[in-house]
Amino acid sequence: MRSSEMTADDKRREPASEHIDVSVLVIGAGGAGARTAIELAERGVDDVLVLGKRNHGDAHTTWARGGINGALGTRDPEDSWAIHAADTLNEGHFVNDPNKVETVTKQMPDRLRELDEWGMDFSRTDGGDIDQRFFGAQSFRRTAFAGDHTGESMLNTLVDRAQELEIPYRENVMITKLLSDGDQLHGAAGFDMESGDLLLFNAGTVVLAAGGYAATYNRHTSRDDENNGDGPALAYAAGAELMDMEFVQFHPTGMAVDENDPEWEPWSGRLVTEAVRGEGGRLFNADGERFMERYSPDQMELDARDVVARAIAEEVANGRGTDNGGVYLDLSHRDRAFIRERLPRMYERFQKLGVDMASEPVEVAPTAHYGMGGVAVDRYGETSVDGLYAIGETMAGVHGANRLGGNSLAETVAFGAVAGEQIAQRVDGPGTVPTRLVRSVAEPHFGDLSEMADRDGEYDVMAVFTEIQDLMWNHAGILRDTETLEAGLDRLAEVRQQTKEMRVGPMTADSFEFAVDIGFMITIAESVLRGALQRTESRGAHYRRDYPEIDSDFQKNIYFEMADLGGMTSHTEPVGTPSPAVQEALDEGHELDYHQLE
């Protein structure tokens, strides 16, 4: 219990108020975490605990709307897992890990059928099969969907299944430190966000399924209190490597709004699902031109996300954008009944804001959406730290330089199953945090948390938080160059100093949560800026104005790790080789012809 008379040294020795013993601790309660826990439970591992920062079922997975990929062949029987893999590698500009790509694409038909068996509310064909739609840069219709609320429906299905299996879950817990000696993972430390109690978890295995880092940018499709880089930053501090952090996907169609209008401002950057374009949505500039004819006459609006995002940015930069810095997305040539059936959430959202999608366009602009980078892991999702796994958006390797739309939800359930199976084969009971780590890592960390709570200072937490987001957008955004990136690193060093003088509330306050997030975001920001500076080429979502071409000699991944004396060090490794089946599909040159939709 804290007292105003406690000294800083007393606080550093303050013990955790609660110790929890568990065989497998899953950090993150979205699709990846839930699917891992289900796999463990179905394989007889009953000593599992899932942690979430929010209420049960309230995770970023619900914001993935458009669909989930798998080569079922419902609409296009000629599709296959190998062609799905080829599309994924093409979209990733061949810096994906081919083995991880193949793991996902081979699994997904079964994972979709499994979700169907568990009761997911998929949209159906007239014959009753799981329906599939076109998504950008995909050769065939392989994106299964539930209207335009696929992520929400999927997570509800997984939560229901987890509850059937009586998997333990704890809400409103934030993990702030992994307890590792750099080689072996022993547990985790954090706090209860409602009570402020400090928590120590003795865990034999920890699974990081804590999302990505898109919310380190000021225009993004997440809520501000998620996707701040918790998972990658926690793994990095524990001794694991980060990989491909420079590859950040800017979704072409976030909401472009008048940010001075209080009704619209909260919606700035929010996702307008790719399904709108998949169902025939067309992009027009302020002059009424269907401008994708200039940039991609064959694939048009359904070209890769990086291509469409840069096209929109160019239109705005050249004075052909809307007053709100975007362009128009128009679906009014479709029947109202069709829009309401296929895109119910989008239709309802804009109706409430006074825009009728069936008769008028909506304004859109690029927005930070997904980090292709993350924690470097092996074929099962395990990091270089024994006992520490990272899956879902927290891991790297599947998406390369740009993610294929519909592959994010696919990755969560595919690697959730893979990691769960592997962990089940090796789990041997709860771990124990060694006394030396309790004294050298856990207790000092709890002291730091206690010292930060109720701290006075010169800088407002949210002002610092916003400064990092602005820094990332301005210095590591859609268009990059040496001068801008170096200036971003210099500014980040200044912001790092500000964090030592922030005004922070108690552990139960929002300001405390965001203060912890800021620590994670600084690690992420440095790795993105350094990776973008080191990659002297343009590849996928990473575009350098001073190096506008792909460099074939840079077909490699950039890794970051913490140096023994502090600081961030990097090295590169070449990518792997696709299997013969996938190489054959690549050689066949499958590609979507947009005009078949017209």
Image (spheres, rainbow, N blue to C red):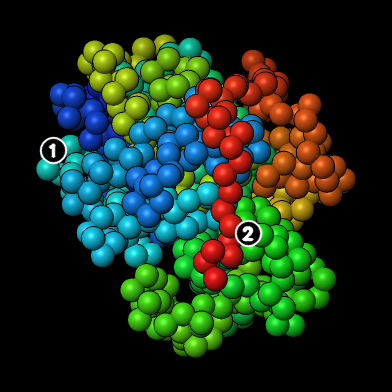
Q: Is residue 117 above or below residue 277?
A: above
Which residue matches tag 1?
165
At numbered mark 1, what does the secondary structure look like: helix, strand or loop? Answer: loop
**Where does the N terminus fall, quadrant-wise?**
top left
Observer-nearest residue: 326 or 214?
A: 326
Residue type, mark 2 in image: Gln
- The mark that comes first in sequence, 1 or 2, is 1
Residue that label 2 marks: 299
SS label for mark 2: loop
CA–CA distance between discs 1 and 2?
A: 45 Å
Residue 172, given in percent of the width and then of the height, sits at: 31, 48
Q: Residue 19: where, in percent of width, then height?
A: 26, 27
As drawn, 409 above or below 344: above
x, y percent for residue 368: 60, 55
Asked whether the viewer can see residue 278, the reply is yes
Percent of width and height locating residue 373 = 58, 37
Which one is in front in this view, the residue at disc 1 or the one at disc 2? Answer: 2
Above or below, comparing residue 554 to residue 508 in the picture:
above
Residue at 58% x, 61% y is 594
Tag 1: residue type?
Answer: Leu
Along the viewing direction, whichever of 66 and 213 lies nearer the viewer = 66
